[in-house]
Image (tube, helix red, strand yellow):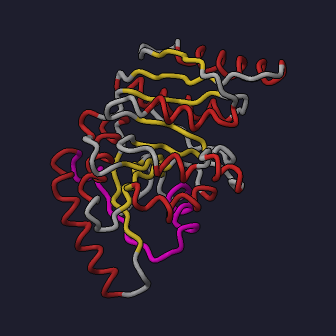
């Protein structure tokens, strides 16, 4: 039974070959952040299919009870459209993060604009027990860079991970000032904690910083890249490979967190 009151890591269950590894990633993140877990499944509006899904989620949840305890494991089967589901998860059930396989990104990512919490897309080939030790965050002149950095701090300070800030290089003085202002705010936040971090300057503008952050993060073993969700990517964005779909398709074994910075985000409690 799904209840509210405590923040939860939701794990998208589609009964594909990636399901087991997706659950393992969700478990790893929940352990890092000390949060409850909920297995969620969207089904057609059919009583038999809904009952089958409920029974299957119960099977998946049994071994998790041994790790978290029965009161911290939940299941949720819904027939609602994604837009409604995302609102329900945030407003009624305290969702902090949704973990899903990358194979579902084309279905889920377009709906991120409705969400006040990030989506974490994971690879079936990545080993979660060794993941989330290295995190890459692009920093440009947009204020949303701070949202990405804030989420990296959640994971880093509870996991001893190292954060690499990928700094954009701008030509105009105003854009340079805005990049440095963001970077100063982020570094000031990070210095309140004990996790290691570094800043690397890329010879590229904010416009292309996400793609270059991907190139750098691909050098991490079992790493995490945090990016901002792009609203209405243009044909030029897609052609140049600087849209979200390109980053996900070329992220190989990286875990990839996508954040919707055009909505107020639900923040970590505790």
Comparing 31 with 101, the one in front is 101
The residue at 50%/62% (across/down) is 106
Q: Is residue 79 magenta?
A: yes
Comparing 39 with 134, the one in front is 134
Relative to 236, 161 lies left or right: left
Magenta residues, as a range? 68-91
Quarter placement of the C terminus? top left
Q: Is residue 21 above or below residue 199?
A: below
Quarter placement of the N terminus? bottom left
Residue 42 lies, in percent from the top left, at 41, 71
Relative to 201, 134 lies left or right: left
Q: Is residue 97 magenta?
A: no
Residue 207 lies, in percent from the top left, at 70, 36
Residue 72 lies, in percent from the top left, at 30, 50
Comparing 245 with 178, the one in front is 245
Residue 25 lies, in percent from the top left, at 31, 46
Relative to 140, 84 lies left or right: left
The residue at 29%/51% (across/down) is 124
The residue at 50%/65% (across/down) is 107
- For residue 79, which quarter of the picture? bottom left
């Amino acid at each position: 039974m799904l209840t509210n009151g405590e923040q939860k890591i939701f794990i998208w269950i589609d009964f594909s070959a990636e399901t087991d590894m997706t659950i393992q990633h969700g478990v790893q993140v929940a352990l890092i952040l000390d949060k409850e877990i909920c297995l969620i499944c969207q089904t057609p509006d059919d009583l038999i299919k809904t009952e089958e899904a409920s029974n299957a989620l119960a099977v998946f949840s049994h071994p998790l009870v041994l790790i978290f305890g029965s009161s911290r494991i939940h299941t949720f089967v819904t027939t609602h459209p994604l837009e409604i589901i995302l609102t329900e998860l945030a407003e009624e059930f305290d969702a902090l993060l949704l973990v899903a396989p990358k194979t579902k990104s084309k279905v889920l990512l377009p709906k991120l604009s409705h969400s006040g919490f990030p989506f974490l897309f994971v690879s079936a080939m990545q080993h979660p027990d060794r993941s989330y030790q290295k995190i890459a965050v692009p920093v440009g002149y947009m204020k949303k860079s701070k949202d990405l950095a804030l989420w990296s701090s959640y994971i880093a300070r509870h996991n001893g991970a190292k954060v690499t800030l990928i700094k954009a290089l701008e030509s105009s003085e105003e854009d340079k000032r805005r990049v440095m202002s963001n970077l100063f705010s982020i570094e000031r936040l990070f210095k309140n904690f004990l996790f290691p971090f570094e800043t690397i300057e890329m010879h590229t503008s904010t416009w292309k910083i996400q793609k270059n952050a991907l190139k750098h993060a691909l050098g991490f073993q079992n790493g995490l890249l945090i990016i901002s969700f792009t609203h209405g990517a243009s044909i030029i964005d897609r052609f140049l490979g600087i849209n979200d779909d390109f980053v996900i398709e070329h992220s190989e074994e990286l875990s990839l967190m996508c954040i919707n910075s055009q909505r107020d985000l639900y923040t970590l409690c505790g």
